[in-house]
Amino acid sequence: MTRTGVILAATLGSAALLLGAYAFQHLGGLAPCKLCIWQRYPHVVAIGVGLIALQIRHRGLAVIGALAALATAGVGVYHVGVEQGWWEGPTSCSAGPIGGMNADELLDQILAAPLVQCDQIAWELLGISMAGWNALLSFGLAGLWLMALRRA
């Protein structure tokens, strides 16, 4: 496979994982937890880097792509550890903007928000959670980025 083909595969891989996460959220009704959201950001970086790398030939872009894939894989491994009870997850929570709401509207929003805990497995396939699949596939994507680096 050519360098361009490898970069395209890595870019499309991150896009597929990101689109899959959004499909589970918006079509499947699985609200993401904080760690699920954290796993999405590096995929966005990898997609952006991939689109640039398809236009500009620079070894540093493959390094950034590999680091982004390793970052999401690392968060995925951390998330799996939280799900399995190997270590504690984040104890903080986050909320969206509250501007322009009165107290009753704010209370309704809070009560309607889904409670999503990072230590609960919402979906799994073959005994591997969504976070685990993200980690495994993202390690593979990092390998593709490193292959692109070698071919640069």
Image (spheres, helix red, strand yellow):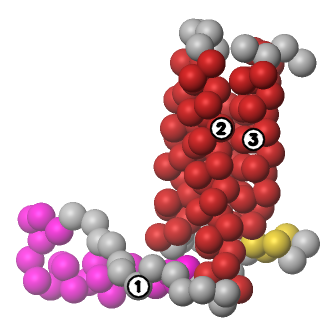
Give SS at disc 2: helix
Residue 66 bears which disc, if any? Answer: 2
Three-letter code for the amino acid on which mark 1 is drawn: Thr
For the C terminus, give its image quadrant: top right
Q: Is residue 114 visible?
A: no
Q: Are marks 2 and 1 in contact (CB under 8 Å)?
A: no
Does dot 3 land on a helix, a strand or a loop? helix
Density class for disc 2 (Cα within 10 Å; few <14, some 14-19, many ≥20) is many
Query: Is disc 3 surrounded by few (<14), some (14 to 19) or many (20+) residues within 10 Å?
Result: many
In magenta segment, residue 15: no
Q: Name the image quarter holding residue 119.
A: bottom right
Q: Which residue is mark 1?
A: 91
* Amino acid under disc 3: Leu
The disc at residue 49 is none
Q: Which residues are magenta?
A: 98-118
**Front position among marks 2 and 1:** 2
Residue 131 seen in render: yes
Q: Please give left or right for residue 118 compared with residue 85 in the image.
A: left
Name the residue that disc number 3 marks. 141
Q: Quadrant of the N terminus?
A: top right
Residue 11 % position (x, y): 67, 31
Q: Amino acid at mark 2?
A: Ala
Residue at the image point whose x is 36% and y is 78% from the top: 93
Q: Nearer the viewer, residue 27 or 72?
A: 72
**Residue 106 picture quarter:** bottom left
Position in image of residue 140 (x %, y %)? 80, 45
In x, y percent, where is residue 151?
79, 16
Q: CA distance from mark 3 to mark 2?
A: 7 Å
> Which of label 3 and label 2 is nearer to you?
2
